[in-house]
Image (spheres, helix red, strand yellow):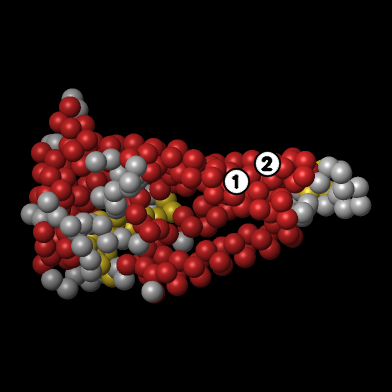
């Protein structure tokens, strides 16, 4: 319930900020007496699409800590936490990165990396992962997350999400306008958009959003392959990452909030592979084994 409330409050706050900004800039007045102002519509959709994605990115560390209950390790309380800090420091140095924040949270085996930039990042591991894997396997998972940061994956996926959000909103409103205009073509008294516009935009945003998610999830799966390869490079061997993925296959993983699903070392299987944020573990292992 806490996660759901946090998700709703955060998204409502983001939409409120963007709506006020669009109103102040005047870009929300794309519907005119003469029809659609396509230029202003594109600016409005870009503001809402990219704005929401980038605000979420800048808030990602804070939201991740709140939604998972992750505790950042500032002063190690035991040998495991000391080892985690030292291991991430070693991996970050190899990847030529500033030291990320390191956190631990209670939950099933999983780990994630998030943050607005390479110099402002977080690597978090679950207690289930620490208990269910050997140290070498945990190190490989940490290397995978550090590789995500080194590859700039959080920013890349944010840009892709911003682009698809923009065009989903843009085309949904164009279709809505023309459907509404067609249905009201004999009504000369009221030229403004009617209920058909709102209903069509709502339906199109759902349909186009589903289609756009296929694009976003494709790039999400590709970044997992790259992070696996990056982990193998940082570890100096493919074997630890392969062993970690095999171990994950035998563990009940996941447990991450919806907003962090794409950031975990393993993701929830979708009913159709096109909508999965992560490739099957078998495919990831095969890709590592085939790498030269």
Q: In percent of the image, x 23 and y 60: which residue is there?
A: 125
- Residue 62 percent location from the top left of the image: 41, 66
Asked whether residue 91 is in view, the answer is no
Foreground residue among 142 and 251 = 251
Q: Is residue 105 left or right of residue 243?
A: right
Q: Which mark is residue 204?
A: 1
User: Which is more N-terminal, label 1 or label 2?
Assistant: 2
Q: In percent of the image, x 72 and y 42: which residue is there?
A: 179
Outermost right residue: 189
Q: Quarter of the image holding residue 69?
A: bottom left
Q: Is residue 61 left or right of residue 56?
A: left
Q: Quadrant of the C terminus?
A: top left
- Residue 202 percent location from the top left of the image: 61, 52
Q: Which mark is residue 62?
A: none
Specify few, some or many for label 2: CA neighbours under 10 Å numbering under 14, 14-19, or 20 or more: some
Foreground residue among 13 and 95 = 13
């Amino acid at each position: 319930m806490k996660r759901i409330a946090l998700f709703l409050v955060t998204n409502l706050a983001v939409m409120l900020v963007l709506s006020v900004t669009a109103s102040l800039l005047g870009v929300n007045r794309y519907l005119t007496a003469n029809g659609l102002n396509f230029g202003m519509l594109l600016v409005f959709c870009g503001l809402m699409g990219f704005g929401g994605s980038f605000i979420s990115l800048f808030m990602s560390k804070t939201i991740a800590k709140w939604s998972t209950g992750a505790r950042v390790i500032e002063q190690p309380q035991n040998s495991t936490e000391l080892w985690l800090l030292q291991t991430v420091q070693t991996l970050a140095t190899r990847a030529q990165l500033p030291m990320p924040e390191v956190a631990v949270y209670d939950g099933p085996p999983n780990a994630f990396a998030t943050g607005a930039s390479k110099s402002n990042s977080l690597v978090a591991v679950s207690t289930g992962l620490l208990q269910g894997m050997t140290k070498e396997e945990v190190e490989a998972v940490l290397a995978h997350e550090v590789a995500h940061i080194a590859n700039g994956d959080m920013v890349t996926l944010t840009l892709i999400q911003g682009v698809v959000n923009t065009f989903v909103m843009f085309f949904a409103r164009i279709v809505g306008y023309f459907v509404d205009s067609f249905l009201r073509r004999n009504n000369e008294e009221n030229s403004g958009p009617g209920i058909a516009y709102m209903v069509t935009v709502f339906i199109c945003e759902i349909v186009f959003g589903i289609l756009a998610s296929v694009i976003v999830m494709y790039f999400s799966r590709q970044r997992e392959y790259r992070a696996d390869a990056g982990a193998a490079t940082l570890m100096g061997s493919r074997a630890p990452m392969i062993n970690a993925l095999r171990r994950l296959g035998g563990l009940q993983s996941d447990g991450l909030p919806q907003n962090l699903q794409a950031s975990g070392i393993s993701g929830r299987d979708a009913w159709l592979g096109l909508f999965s944020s992560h490739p099957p573990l078998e495919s990831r292992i095969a890709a590592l084994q085939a790498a030269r």
